Amino acid sequence: MTTRLTLADPDRNGLSVSTDAVRLSPGARRAVGADVGDPVAVEGGARTVAVVGDDAPQLPDGVVLAGDTVRRNAESTVGASVTVAAVEPVAARSVTVAPTNSVSLSGDSEALSRALAGRPLSVGDRIGVDLFGGSLDVRLTVVDLDPDGPAVVTDETTVSIRPADPTGVDGAVPAVPPDGVGGLDEPRAALQRLVARPLADPEGYAAVGARPPAGVLLAGPSGVGKTRLLGAVAADAGLPIHEVPPNDCGSRESLAAVLRAADDDAPAILLIERLETVAPSSDEGASSAVAWLLDRVRDRDDLVVVGEASSADAVDPALRRGGRFDSEVRVDVPDRAARREVLAVHAADLPLADDADLDWLAARTHGYTGADLEAVVVEAATRAVDRAGDGPATVGRAEFDAAVEAVGPSALRETVVERPSVSYEEIGGLDEAIETVVRTVEWPLRYPELFERLSITPPTGVLLSGPPGTGKTLLAKAVATSTAANFLSVDGPELMNRYVGESERGVRELFDRARRSAPAVVFLDELDALAPARGSTDTGAAERVVSQLLTELDGLSARGEVAVLAATNRPDAIDPALLRPGRIERQVAVPLPDRAARREILAIHLADVPTAGVDLDALAAATAGYTGSDLAGVVREAGLLAMGEALGTDRPTAATDEPVVEHRHLRAAVEASRPSVDDRADDFEWQDP
């Protein structure tokens, strides 16, 4: 049976666990359907196999304690949600492994076979093996299994050793590009074709009767490496770059002086940075001097003007035409493979610990630009130095993990909810809603290859509808936590702007960020305020926003890389066109919790609270009509009452006793409160425990 559990923190729980094992409470182990010593599949961002260790009665039933190797192979961290299921591994006929650290294992396959005997493996697992009585610690990657895993190594298994990949595919540190610019292969090829080759071989263009570009617009978010990339391409071709100061772009005389200097070095590149500030699209006529420069270069084959901008749309359209900026090259936020290359560049000289894994780090940094990734590496290195004190410092997973939390993706800082840590286990009474959201939002983000294999188009969006405080936003955050996707959240009123065109621009920019940082979840709270039914308002602003939303939803990729979650307590007020198939097509009810759900919610909120004599059944019965947020308020008020008693009246700044929340505190909190949606019956009678 597959069970969803939260990865517990060994330090916080005071428990130990083997690096390749998991530990569960007896109840959780029975729910999984495994005995101590049995193998189980653990799946987070990836799937791996672990062995069930001794029972841990101290653990809650909703968590699992996993060793470092298990967490790394499952691509998950403490606090993340994973699935755990009993499996029956087959006997492996053959297994092929490759060392991930610098060691030669030629002729050691017999010792390796003994070390791996009885161990369940999956392809892609990164494992540690002690050879020769522990004198040699070897880090390995399982690169092949026959039959496909999970499989167990037996005495009959043929173990093969593949040499470590010199390109770094199997290792923790991939190869570093010679010029130190990683992850930009496509824009690099475009710049070589449009800039370097025309300047190096003007006769080739003349032979075919073609004119080389006068200008190339290099566009992309700040920090993605535009200037560094252009410098690398120019260095490869031996071309000088003459930078044009932005302040000189308003004067033809200043530009003429720059042009004369470039003449002396021709063939050469003239670079204009921050072109959107020099020649903005909103200021007609501001680009006349730049247009003059481009017109002078147009008929020459030894000079090219390159303009850099954060967005091509922000540049004056008069410059974006033939004979001026003829071509445009886009430099996007790096994807996972590109992030791995960039991290390899910046971590090349770092003393990495054995548990440092750049693959894992690349998977955790969706939406990070090259500059962001450099900041992550620098932050991790400084933390390692602080931790080491006077000793030798090594940078490991703990330092990288903390650095990722400290350095957010710059492309998303205006709207991102920074790394939500809400798990499904923290949401009570919404099992049906969670199941629907997982199928329609999480599956397309987690398993896109399965949708492609079945030729199924993933749902584009889901509408969560229900009264305020029932857990709609909490559910959206849990989706982002479970998928490790970037989470962009906005309230409907935030995007509404009284200036014509600004609201539509806000919607456009929101979805543009989501596409650039995919996989991503866009959460639109209070959708009824953002997209009311057309014709129901007095102005045309709402209608323009609805039209823009429809355009963005229709333009989302069919691969499910961007999912849309919306929330409302008035589904009838939303424009019907948004709720059609291919848009926000699924509606999920998030109702008021019933009695059983209220008991579950109260148990969740009281899980970490010192309590005595609490009757959850009585409290659930007394809180009819309460939402999840109402119940959280009840627990908070009860805690304040208990704290007040512990502080006393004579010593208001020091606790005389350890505060404990008792049933009477919770009862008093309930009696002093009212449900925010439905009223509790006034004739309710308490049944004291």
Image (cartoon, rainbow, N blue to C red):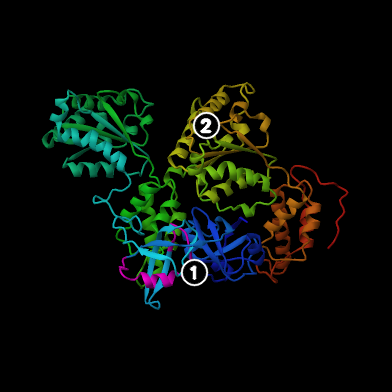
Q: Residue at 88%, 49% (x, y): give it.
A: 683
Q: Which mark is residue 553?
A: 2
- Between 619 and 315, the one nearer to me in the picture: 619
Residue 46 magenta: no
Query: In the picture, residue 306 is in which quadrant?
Result: top left
Nearer to us in this view, 215 or 53:
53
The image's mark for residue 118 is 1
Q: CA distance from mark 1 to mark 2?
A: 51 Å
Which residue is most to the left? 264
Badges 1 and 2: C-beta atoms under 8 Å apart?
Answer: no
Name, please, the residue furthest toward the front.
Answer: 156
In the rendered image, is residue 11 in sight? yes
Task: Tell me which residue sits at (40%, 76%) in the image.
Answer: 134
Q: In the drawing, does residue 245 fall left or right of residue 449?
A: left
Q: Is residue 468 above or below residue 406?
A: above
Residue at image point 62% right, 70% down: 55
Q: Amino acid at mark 2?
A: Leu
Residue 157 rendering spot, x and y as whole percentages: 43, 66
Of residue 246 and residue 189, the one placed in the foreground of this image is 189
* Badge 1 amino acid: Gly
Q: Residues within 10 Å of mark 2 (few under 14, many from 20)?
A: many
Image position of 152 (left or right of 37): left
Query: Does residue 416 appear in the picture of this structure?
Result: no
Residue range highlighted in magenta: 102-126
